[in-house]
Amino acid sequence: EAQVTQNPRYLITVTGKKLTVTCSQNMNHEYMSWYRQDPGLGLRQIYYSMNVEVTDKGDVPEGYKVSRKEKRNFPLILESPSPNQTSLYFCASSPRPGSSYEQYFGPGTRLTVT
Amino acid sequence: RKEVEQDPGPFNVPEGATVAFNCTYSNSASQSFFWYRQDCRKEPKLLMSVYSSGNEDGRFTAQLNRASQYISLLIRDSKLSDSATYLCVVNPGYNFNKFYFGSGTKLNVKP
């Protein structure tokens, strides 16, 4: 089944404890992206990747890192999480870079930082 | 000013009703436009792309008005299963890999 998977789905952690949220897609998509969703603000783009080893900042990259060492994986790293990073996170992929393609979303990761 | 703005609703309509949502965007150079549907904090799923000439998919019609910088979504003959939050998504044009999402319009279809 073609899909985007994220792990973990739920995470409660403490301020400053490094964490990684994994994202994997099995559709051979070139483009991948991370978003966070907060009430009243909609989804905001954190980082995106056009292909292996090619990443760029979205609108809210502060406090996050990403890497794209393999085509299928695009992990999101929070080196020192803070409470303002409590949010619902979605990973998405699409076949190619470029604005006209549908994005396929993972099921989301609900992160709470205390 | 936000890149993309939507009326949060909720829009409460009876089954069978016709309902329309608008979404305004701030960047006149915006290139691509989409409507996504999101059920109760689950992942968004593409409902339809919005083309310059307007497009229809069954009960759903999307329109683009570049002069006034808004897109619209019309749902005819609403079903209970249409209850969801509808997200407007815009690519700003200056970067084809960036996307701006509206905060969504909630639709409740009542029996």
Image (cartoon, coloured by chain):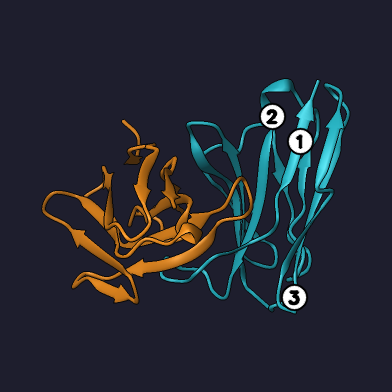
Chain colours: A cyan, B orange
Total numbered badges shown on the rendered structure: 3
Residue furthest out toward the front:
B111
Name the subunit of mark 2: A
What residue does disc 3 label?
A26
Classify 10 Å Cα crowding around label 3: few (below 14), some (14-19), many (20 and above). some
Residue in the picture at 33% in, 61% down? B16
Name the subunit of mark 1: A
| Three-letter code, disc 2 | Gln
User: Mark 1, mark 3: which one is toward the viewer?
Assistant: 1
What residue does disc 2 label?
A85
Classify residue A36 by image quadrant.
Answer: top right
The Cα–Cα distance between marks 2 and 1, rounded to whole angstroms, is: 8 Å
| Three-letter code, disc 3 | Asn
Q: Nearer the viewer, residue B61 or B91?
A: B61
Q: Is residue B80 left or right of residue B55?
A: right
Q: Secondary structure at mark 1?
A: strand
Residue in the picture at 60% in, 46% down? B40
